[in-house]
Each structure stands twice: as C-alpha cells, then as structure tokens.
Amino acid sequence: MDAYEYLSQAKLLDHQIQSKLSQLESLKSLATSAASCCGNREPIVKHSRNVSAMEDTILKIIEAEKELNAQIDELVDLKLEISRTIAQVKDVTLRLILEKHFLAFQSLKDIGRDLGFGKRWMQIKYKMAVAAVQTILEREESG
C-alpha cells in the first residue's frame, strides 16, 4: 500500500460512518413515525403482529448501531495508527500538513491559507509530506 492510500483510509472510513449515521437516523425517523401513526389506533386482531414487527425493527436498528459503533472504534484505532506514523516525520510543517489533511480532513487550500502558503508552495510541501510517509512505510516493511 502506498502512502497516499494508507493515509486516506481514515477519510474513507469516516465517510462510510457518516453515511451509516445518516441512514440510521432515517431508519429511526421512519420507525418513530410508523409507531406514532399506527400506535394511536384501537387494537385490532393483528395487534400482536404489529408489535412483533415493531420489535423486529427496533432490533434491526440496535444491530445497525452496534455495527456503527464497531466502525467508529475502528476509525479511532486507524487514526491513532496513522497519527503514530505521521509523528515519525521529522519536519514539523510536514507533520502539521499531514495531520490537518488526513486526520482533521481539511482541504489543502484551507491548510495553505492557515500556514500562509501559496497554492504552488502548498502542493510542493504536500508532496514532500506524503513522500516522507512513504519512506517511513517502506522502512517499516523492510525491517
């Protein structure tokens, strides 16, 4: 795995988590609206079946929340691992660029503005930063 792929893992996982959070909120909203819509009616013969269906829905939501929490734990572990790798970069500015871009998910444009770098200088520094991580990864693979 090259340095860019390695560093980008956290952002990809974060996007997956955000997508699942959105889906989970949508499911909860649907379940809540279904419960309030159907819960006000007088019980009829199929009452026990509706309760069972609602229980199934709630159990599915709980299972989805467990999966989401596992992914969040994975993201935290991955960010810690990437952070430890970035910490091995000797140049403080390069470390800062890597942390802001790959751990805080800031755009290179915003990072350049914060650091007072022009677009071209930011691109150069970014390439240097990723190359530094590539060297670290290669060193770890070989030894």
Image (cartoon, rainbow, N blue to C red):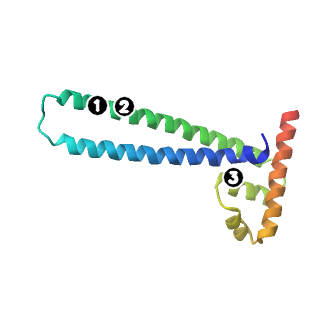
Q: Callout 1: helix, strand or loop?
A: helix
Answer with the quarter of the image where residue 109 lies: bottom right
Q: Callout 2: helix, strand or loop?
A: helix
Quarter of the image with the C terminus is top right
Amino acid type for the residue under numbered disc 3 = Phe
Q: Do the residues bearing badges 3 and 2 touch, measured as CB atoms within 8 Å? A: no
Answer with the quarter of the image where residue 45 lies: top left
| On screen, residue 77 above or below 130 | above
The residue wearing badge 3 is 102
In this rendering, would 117 be left or right of 19? right
The Cα–Cα distance between marks 3 and 2, rounded to whole angstroms, is 35 Å
Quarter of the image with the N terminus is top right
Q: Nearer the viewer, mark 2 or mark 1?
A: 1
Q: Residue at x 40, y 47 (%)?
A: 25
Q: Nearer the viewer, mark 3 or mark 1?
A: 1
Amino acid type for the residue under numbered disc 1 = Ala
Amino acid type for the residue under numbered disc 2 = Leu
Residue 31 place in picture, x, y as percent: 31, 42
| Labels 3 and 2: the sequence-earlier one | 2
Q: Do the residues bearing badges 3 and 1 touch, measured as CB atoms within 8 Å? A: no
Q: Residue at x 84, y 43 (%)?
A: 136
Of 65 and 86, which appears nearest the observer? Answer: 65
Pointer 2 local density, CA inside 10 Å: few below 14, some 14–19, many at least 20: few
Pointer 1 local density, CA inside 10 Å: few below 14, some 14–19, many at least 20: few
The residue wearing badge 1 is 53
| Labels 3 and 1: the sequence-earlier one | 1
The residue wearing badge 2 is 59
